[in-house]
C-alpha cells in the first residue's frame, strides 16, 4: 500500500531505504529525544520489525520518499501500541522520524495527516494517539498542528526507560476521528 500526498509517498520499505534510514538513526541530533542512536544492525532490525507489523496488521510506519526526486525523507505512519506497560495501551499511535535535511519543511505534518486519514477513513479507528518525551517540543508542535490535544492527566513515565532517565517523562496527545474530520 502506498499513501500519496502532494509532495511525498509513504510506501513499503525497500532495500534502498536501509542505508539512509541507518544514517538517520545514527545521527545524534535526530535521535536526541530517544535513549540512544542506533547501529546499522539495530536500524536494519527495526525495519524488519516494521515490515512484520505491516504483514501482521496491514499498516505501520512507512518509508517516506519525496515525490520530486525519490529522496528518502524518513518514516511516518501509524502502528499498534499493544504493550500493557503503556498506560494508554492498547492504542494506535501516529509517529514520525525524519532526516535532519528534511526538518522544518512541513513534511512530518503532511505525511502524518495522510497516515491519520488512512487510520480514520479506511481503517475506521476511533482514536489515534501520539507521544514523545517532554523536551521534544518540535514533535509536540506537529501533534498540535494535526489537531491533537494533550491532557496533562495522560502524561506518563515511559515504562521502558530507567527511573532516572532524563527522557522518561512523556506527554500523550490524542485525536478522535470526529475531531480529525472537522
Image (cartoon, rainbow, N blue to C red):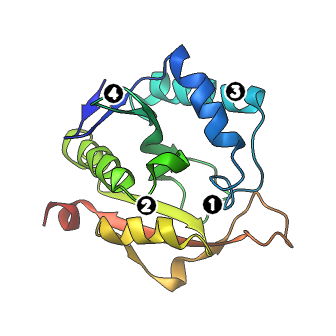
Q: What percent of the width, then of the height, locates residue 120?
A: 24, 49
Secondary element type, mark 1: loop
Q: What percent of the width, then of the height, locates residue 90?
A: 51, 53
Secondary element type, mark 4: loop
Furthest-bottom residue in view? 152
Q: Residues within 10 Å of mark 4 (few under 14, many from 20)?
A: few
User: Do the residues bearing badges 4 and 3 touch, measured as CB atoms within 8 Å?
Assistant: no
Q: Residues within 10 Å of mark 1 (few under 14, many from 20)?
A: some
Question: Image quadrant for the N terminus?
Answer: top left
Residue 41 falls in which quadrant of the image? top right
Between the residue at mark 4 and the residue at mark 1, the CA separation in whole angstroms equals 39 Å
- Tell me, for residue 86, which label it has, or none: 1
Q: Nearer the viewer, residue 136 or 171?
A: 136
- The image shows residue 23, relative to residue 126, as above or below, that is above
Q: Residues within 10 Å of mark 3 (few under 14, many from 20)?
A: few
N-term-proximal mark, 1 vs 3 = 3
Furthest-left residue in view? 182
Residue drawn at (71%, 41%) of the image: 26
Secondary element type, mark 3: helix
Between the residue at mark 1 and the residue at mark 3, the CA separation in whole angstroms equals 22 Å
- Tell me, for residue 45, which label it has, or none: 3
- Tell me, for residue 129, which label it has, or none: 2
Q: For the residues carrying marks 4 and 3, which lies nearer the camera in this image?
A: 4
Q: Residues within 10 Å of mark 2 (few under 14, many from 20)?
A: many
Q: Nearer the viewer, residue 99 or 162?
A: 99
N-term-proximal mark, 4 vs 1 = 4
Residue drawn at (42%, 44%) of the image: 78
Q: What percent of the width, then of the height, locates residue 69?
A: 33, 27
Between the residue at mark 4 and the residue at mark 3, the CA separation in whole angstroms equals 27 Å
Q: Nearer the viewer, residue 64 or 80?
A: 64
Between the residue at mark 2 and the residue at mark 1, the CA separation in whole angstroms equals 12 Å
Amino acid at each position: 500500500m502506498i499513501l500519496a500526498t502532494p509532495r511525498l509517498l509513504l510506501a513499503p520499505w525497500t532495500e534502498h531505504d536501509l542505508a539512509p534510514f541507518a544514517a538517520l538513526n545514527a545521527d545524534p541530533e535526530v535521535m536526541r529525544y530517544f535513549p540512544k542512536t542506533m547501529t546499522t544492525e539495530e536500524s536494519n532490525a527495526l525495519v524488519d520489525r516494521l515490515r512484520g507489523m505491516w504483514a501482521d496488521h496491514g499498516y505501520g510506519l512507512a518509508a517516506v520518499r519525496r515525490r520530486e526526486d525519490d529522496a528518502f525523507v524518513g518514516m511516518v505512519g501509524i502502528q499498534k501500541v499493544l504493550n500493557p506497560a503503556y498506560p494508554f495501551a492498547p492504542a494506535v499511535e501516529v509517529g514520525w522520524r525524519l532526516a535532519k535535511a528534511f526538518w522544518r519543511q512541513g513534511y512530518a505534518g503532511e505525511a502524518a495527516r495522510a497516515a491519520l486519514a488512512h487510520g480514520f477513513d479506511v481503517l475506521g479507528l476511533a482514536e489515534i494517539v501520539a507521544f514523545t518525551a517532554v523536551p521534544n517540543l518540535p514533535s509536540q508542535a506537529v501533534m498540535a498542528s494535526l489537531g491533537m490535544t494533550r491532557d496533562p492527566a495522560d502524561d506518563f513515565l515511559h515504562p521502558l526507560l530507567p527511573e532516572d532517565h532524563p527522557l522518561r517523562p512523556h506527554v500523550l496527545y490524542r485525536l478522535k476521528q470526529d475531531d480529525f474530520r472537522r
